[in-house]
Image (spheres, coloured by chain):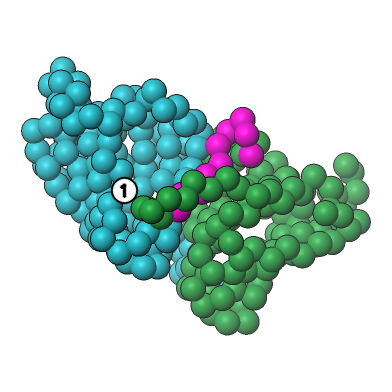
Chain colours: A cyan, B green
């Protein structure tokens, strides 16, 4: 991973005759306590989502069904991560530009967020993002 | 809902040309800050999951793909809730016996939990549960 502080992790799974359970929890793979979750689904073919950074909010992404590609950019380096398993999580720290694309028709992306929704907390302009990212 | 303190809620959804997003957050529909999440998937036909209560842990369940039926029981009353939409959440307080069954083959159940995993926190014996439930 070239993009500073973004972490991709393999999530634990408990698998038996009754099915599979994967998880993450605070103090282990989840580096914050989430106050909000959201799920993104029914994304039409060819659409992109995201296209912003957060000022302070941390996020943890898991594609719990299907697959989606997540591009991350810290203003200096870029990476693209294919999420195609409920056993892979990505931690995205604040001040990282992220875009999701190439959703499969059945894709369900779970996002845990370190704070509740605040529209003022988003950086939606890439030039503004580069200024903020340069102040690291 | 006959079972005390179990709440079924309709989750907000933001739907546009880029797809759908549903969410819950602390202070609104989510009555606790989750320290752990888990997802249950690939449950074979005819299997049941759950079959326990928690001493103190609160949970919030959303079937983010497919469908599953959740039976809840507070020791006096029982109910069964069909989860077949990512826009429906169930809050399950402590000391409620819960069983999940009739999973569709594509079902993915998201569970947010108010605390990290602790095996001593489970009540796995129904008679013990009835004793605890009677002490409400």
| Rendered residue at 77%/65% (across/down) | B80
Picture coordinates of residue B92, whole percent (x, y):
70, 49
Q: Furthest-bottom residue in view?
A: B45
For the C terminus of chain B, the quadrant is: top right
Mark 1 chain: A
Q: Quadrant of residue A45?
A: bottom left
Magenta region: B20-29
| Rendered residue at 37%/25% (across/down) | A121
Is residue A114 rendered magenta in the image?
A: no
Q: Is residue B91 above or below residue B78?
A: above
Is residue A97 at all visible to an observer of this figure?
A: yes
| Residue that carries the numbered disc 1 in the rendered image | A49
Q: Furthest-top residue in view?
A: A135
Q: Quadrant of residue A72?
A: top left
Q: Is residue A88 above or below residue A61?
A: below
* B52 left or right of A132 in image: right
Q: Quadrant of residue B26?
A: top right
Q: Furthest-front residue in view?
A: B17
């Amino acid at each position: 991973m070239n993009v500073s502080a973004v972490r991709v992790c393999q999530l634990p799974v408990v698998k038996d005759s009754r099915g599979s359970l994967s998880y993450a929890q605070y103090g282990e793979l989840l580096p914050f306590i989430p106050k909000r979750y959201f799920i993104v689904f029914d994304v039409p073919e060819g659409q992109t989502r995201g296209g912003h950074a957060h000022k302070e909010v941390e996020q943890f992404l898991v594609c719990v069904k299907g697959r989606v590609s997540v591009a991350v950019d810290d203003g200096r380096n870029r990476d693209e991560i294919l999420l195609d398993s409920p056993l892979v999580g990505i931690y995205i720290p604040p001040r990282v530009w992220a875009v999701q694309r190439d959703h499969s028709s059945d894709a369900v992306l779970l996002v845990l967020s370190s704070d509740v929704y605040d529209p003022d907390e988003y950086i939606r302009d890439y030039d503004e993002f580069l200024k903020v990212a340069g102040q690291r």
